[in-house]
Amino acid sequence: MGNYKFILSGGGTGGHIYPAIAIANELKRRYATAEILFVGAKDKMEMEKVPQAGYRIKGLWISGLQRKLTLKNLMFPIKLMYSLLSARKIVRTFKPDAVIGTGGFASGPLLRAASVKGVPCLLQEQNSHAGITNRLLAKKAQKICVAYEGMERYFPKEKLVLTGNPVRSDLINAKMDKAEALHFFGLESEQPVLLILGGSLGARKINQLIESKLPFFKALGVQLLWQCGQLYYSEYRQYESDQVKVKPFINRMENAFAVADMIVSRSGAGTVSELCLVGKPVVFIPSPNVAEDHQTKNAMALVEQEAALLYKEGQSDKEFEGVFRQLMTSDELRNSLSNNIKALALPRATEHIVDEIEKLLR
């Protein structure tokens, strides 16, 4: 008992990879002798991130369809057939007890091959608008774990389980001491702190907006903790001061969340789940450059529950000032947003997903 074999497949972006790694870690915690194999797309970031997390990974020769006619699109049918054959071989030789897909190109061939062999399959959908791979795979899966209500728009209702998205365990268990965190970043306790998150690489449009609004924030007496991203640090480090702390990347996110009175952030699925847990008032600025406009849909799911504010790229700078001033000057709004976003938190998501996998094993 416990000598199970699991295949996890998901990748292309951190939003698919990190949930898969979190699920693998929980499976390993429960079944120390379990064998775990990841399957990803050959040239994607999972081929680096998964081994760093301590797991084996096999790569499939697969990529998505481009939106315009390209050579890559002409190659797609060949890649798909080759990946299906490779996936069948992986399933046949590894003989998994269950297969878990978290989205991304590689999970398509892999879950299809597993379902043909009668292997129980579970999907984990992070976004409020289901990705195309998971929508196509819904018939093959026994269970579909989701992070938002109303997902029967995309999936059979009887297969759905509302679990939430896996979030980093260090965030769940973190003891957030605001005084200690203020000292850590060199910030004052008398003035409110705005935390700006554009993702680990940074978001050019958010950085440009913040740069243009530095006099506005100064006039309001707001301190900034600004994660501008590795790509942009050399450009924005010049703005470092007593009131503005510019970071390429923040490793101690629990300290960043402890100091924050308000947050401006992208709205990727993992980030949204973490911010629900943190429970601070948020202005989401979704990236318009992601597949199927997922980030806007994730943000809107919270805005409709009065759990966040939204500012879209392309709106005027004056509109941002209006949104932020409203947040800054209304204690009632900040408290309401904070309470509403906290009510949406599902901190035990990883455990609940693995509970569902265990049910499939039985």
Image (cartoon, helix red, strand yellow):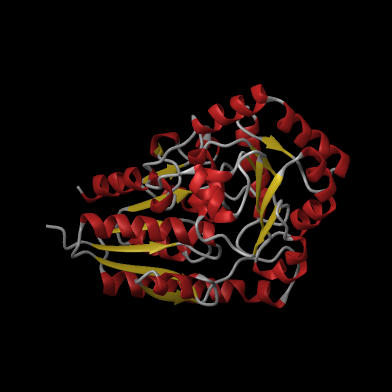
The image shows residue 188 at horizontal and vertical percentages of 63, 45
Q: Is residue 273 left or right of residue 23?
A: right
> Looking at the picture, how far across and down is residue 186, in whole percent?
60, 54
Instruction: Name the residue at 73% across, 66% down.
Output: 237
Residue 310 in the image: above or below residue 92: above
Foreground of the two, 298 or 264:
264
All told, the count of numbered labels is 0
Inspect this view and state whether residue 33 appears: yes
> Closest to the observer: 20 or 333?
333
Residue at 88% over, 39% down: 318
State the residue lying farthest toward the top. 332
48 or 327: nearer the viewer:
327
Can residue 140 be seen in the rendering of this structure? no
x and y percentages locating residue 340 in the rendered image: 55, 28
Q: Is residue 321 left or right of residue 297?
A: right
Residue 321 position within the rendered picture, expressed as x and y whole percent measured from the top left: 82, 38
Residue depicted at 57% across the width and 37% down the height: 280
Q: Residue at x 56, y 76 (%)?
A: 78
Relative to 298, residue 20 above or below: below
In which quarter of the view is residue 34 placed?
bottom left
Quadrant (top left, top right, bottom left, bottom right) of the N terminus: bottom left
Q: 295 or 184: nearer the eye?
A: 184
Q: Is residue 195 left or right of residue 221?
A: left
